[in-house]
Image (cartoon, rainbow, N blue to C red):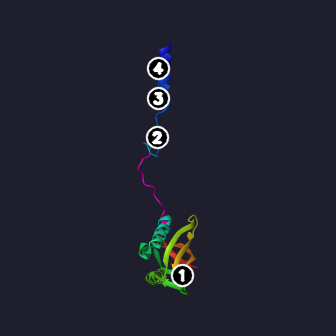
Amino acid sequence: MKWFLVILLMSFISEAQVKTQPVTIQADDTLVTPSVHSVVQRSPIAEIFQNVEHGLQNNAVDKFKKELGEIVSMTISSGDHGYYSANQAVLVLVGYFSERRLVSFKFSRIHEKDSAPYATGRFIYVQKGMQKSAQVYVSLTQQDSQWVISQFNIY
């Protein structure tokens, strides 16, 4: 009887240690188990903000130039301000960042749950041997049913 209780106890312990994956039922009643290697889908808005962040971190405006709208409103602390075509906006940004050596940049706030998504963060750079910082503000709008950068400010 003692051995029977030990074997029974061992079987309960081994069953408790088995790891299970959650099972979900889809609309067509098929069972689906989540993949361990599934890729997380980012929203188009988050993708644009990530491209801008990586572009600024790598001094590579070309990483997000395809996300610029047909017309981009810009206010740049170097004195440039107004409405620019996508190509003109690239030239303004390349000129601005060519005179500044990046120390760090990261968006500190990303708001994508509205009809006017935006992101803002601190750009820290060295210019003429002095460390300085500027606030970067990027907002998006829909153009031809796609999200594009409509405003790019550096204060």
**Are dots 1 and 2 in contact, CB under 8 Å?**
no
Compare marks 3 and 2 and give the one earlier in the sequence. Answer: 3
SS at badge 3: helix
Picture quarter with the C terminus = bottom right
* Residue on which disc 3 sits: 14
Mark 2, mark 4: which one is toward the viewer? 4
What amino acid is at disc 4?
Ile
The Cα–Cα distance between marks 1 and 2, rounded to whole angstroms, is: 50 Å
Mark 3, mark 1: which one is toward the viewer? 3
The Cα–Cα distance between marks 4 and 3, rounded to whole angstroms, is: 11 Å
Residue at image point 52% right, 78% down: 126
Considering only vertical position in the picture, is 20 above or below 83?
A: above
Nearer-the-camera pick, 124 or 20: 124
Res. 142 visible in picture: no
Compare marks 2 and 4 and give the one earlier in the sequence. Answer: 4
Instruction: Point out which mark residue 74 bears.
Output: 1
- Magenta stretch, overall SS: loop
* Residue on which disc 4 sits: 7
Give the image location of residue 77, x and y in percent.
Answer: 56, 83
* Residue on which disc 2 sits: 21
Mark 3, mark 2: which one is toward the viewer? 3
Nearer-the-camera pick, 56 or 23: 56
Compare marks 4 and 3 and give the one earlier in the sequence. Answer: 4
